[in-house]
Image (cartoon, grey):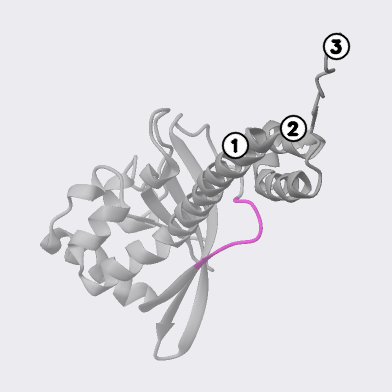
Amino acid sequence: MIHEPEPDSVPVVRRLSPLAMASIATSVLPVGSLLAPILGIAALLQLRRRPGLRGAAGAWGGVVIGTAASALMVGGAYWMYRSLQQLADRPGTALAAAWAGEAELFRAQMAAPANEVTAPRLEAWVAPLKAQLGTFAGATMGTAPPPAPPELLPEREMRAAYVCRFGAAGGTRDIQTIVVFERPLATESVAAIRIRRFEFELPDGARIVFPPDEQRDAPSDGRTAGDEPRR
């Protein structure tokens, strides 16, 4: 009996799943990484229903890489939010610590030279402010930008407008306050930003600079040392 040779079998080419390709491609994108795990899971379900498709490795890669990248992105965003929130709360924390005599907490919020102040010196700084302004009750960031400074600021200084509330026997009053921060170095993060000084704008037009060591010139119009802005 003569056997005829069987025709060569034609290999079946399995098409790559578009969902798997999309999953692995988006897993390395900043925002697309949020979609990559969803696309990867959808691709794996599709592969189970359609054996003629391939791409399980790409789908699993999209799930794993996308999940890791998303976790890093969300964690980084939360860290930035917390850093900015702490920065916004820093003036209130510093003033509350100063009024309470908590020198260590006050120093932690301040840039040099106030970050080295001793407890007795801090008490001497705050005593006249307590007599003039009353009890510190809180500080909130203002909605309007701070007024333009009378002169060009040093390179590492930046200003923000706040409203500080003080209480006394006659009730509470809000004092417009300029908070001057020290800009971080290029290698430092937002968390490294500290306060250089507070400039309290009193209703009568006087300005109190705190800490007083931040004054540039002695007053020339008869005001007390704490009532003169830096020049």
**Seen in the image, is 58 located left or right of residue 151?**
right
Above or below — where is 142 with respect to 8? below
Q: Residue at 32% of width from left, 54% of height from top?
A: 109
In the rendered structure, the answer to whether residue 63 lies left or right of residue 217 reads right
**What residue does disc 3 label?**
1
Tell me the residue that label 2 is attached to: 21
Q: Position of residue 14 (x, y in %)?
A: 80, 28
Decide whether the magenta segment is chiefly helix, strand or loop: loop
Q: Is residue 207 above or below residue 193?
A: below
Eye-nearest disc, 3 or 1: 3
Q: Quadrant of the C terminus?
A: top left
Q: Position of residue 93 (x, y in %)?
A: 36, 65
Left of 17 or right of it: where is 212?
Answer: left
Closer-to-camera residue (223/53): 53
Report the disc number at residue 61.
1
Q: Which comes sooner in the sequence, label 3 or label 1? A: 3
Tell which of 10 and 158 is nearer to you.
Answer: 10
Placement of 63 over or under 13, stated as above or below: below
Choose mark 3 or mark 2, whichever is in front.
3
Q: Is residue 217 visible?
A: yes
The residue at the point 71 percent across, 38 percent down is 23
Q: Amino acid at mark 3?
A: Met
Give yes or no for residue 143 being in the magenta stretch.
Answer: yes
Q: Going from the N terminus, do you reach mark 3 or mark 2 first?
A: 3
Along the polypeptide, which appears first: circle 1 or circle 2?
2
Considering the image in quadrants, where does the N terminus appear? top right
Instruction: Report x, y in % for residue 188.
Output: 38, 34
Cα–Cα gap, marks 1 and 2 = 10 Å
| Distance Cα–Cα, label 3 vs label 1 | 55 Å
Bounds of the magenta segment: 140-146
